[in-house]
C-alpha cells in the first residue's frame, strides 16, 4: 500500500493490504491497475498514475489507498517533489 517512516525514523517500512484470508476467493482484477498506478507514481508520471488509480476506484469506490495516492499525484503534479524523493511517507508526530 505504501512505505511509511514512523516518527523518529528515516527508513520506510512497507505497509501491505490483506486482500483475502487464506482459502478465500477475492476479486483481484483491480490489483493490476493499482500496481500500475504505483509504478507510474514512482516514475513521476502523474497523469498516468491518476488514470490508473481512477480505474482502481471505478472497481473499488471505497479504496482509501487508491484515493490517497490519486490525491497525492494531483498534489505532486501541481508541486513536484524535490530531487532525491524516496516515496516514503514520513509521520512527523507520535
Image (cartoon, rainbow, N blue to C red):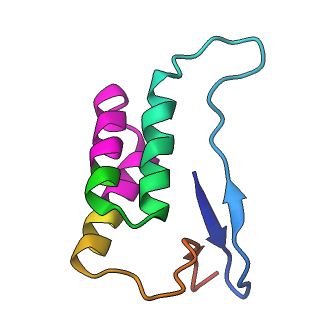
Using the image, determine if residue 76 lies above or below residue 7.
above
Q: Residue at x 66, y 35 (%)?
A: 18
> In this rendering, would 40 be left or right of 4?
left
Q: Is residue 6 magenta?
A: no
Please tell me whether residue 59 belongs to the stretch shown in magenta.
Answer: yes
| Residue in the image at 41% along x and 40% along y | 63
> How many labels sit on residues?
0
- Residue 44 vs residue 71, the one in the foreground: 44
> In the image, residue 1 lies at what x, y percent?
57, 51
Q: Please state if 17 lies on the left or on the right of 50 as rendered.
A: right
Give above or below for 28 relative to 9. Answer: above
Percent of width and height locating residue 57: 32, 36
The quadrant of the image that shows the C terminus is bottom right
**Of the pair 20 and 51, the residue shown nearer to us:** 51
Q: Which residues are magenta?
A: 51-71
User: Magenta: predominant secondary structure element?
Assistant: helix
User: Where is residue 43 drawn, in percent x and y?
Assistant: 45, 64
Amino acid at each position: 500500500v505504501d512505505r511509511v517512516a514512523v516518527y523518529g525514523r528515516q527508513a520506510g517500512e512497507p505497509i501491505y493490504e490483506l486482500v483475502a484470508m487464506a482459502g478465500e476467493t477475492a476479486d483481484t482484477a483491480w490489483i493490476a491497475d493499482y500496481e500500475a498506478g504505483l509504478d507510474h507514481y514512482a516514475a513521476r508520471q502523474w497523469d498516468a498514475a491518476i488514470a490508473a488509480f481512477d480505474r482502481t476506484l471505478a472497481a473499488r469506490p471505497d479504496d482509501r489507498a487508491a484515493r490517497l495516492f490519486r490525491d497525492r499525484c494531483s498534489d505532486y503534479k501541481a508541486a513536484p517533489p524535490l530531487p532525491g524523493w524516496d516515496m516514503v511517507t514520513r509521520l512527523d508526530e507520535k
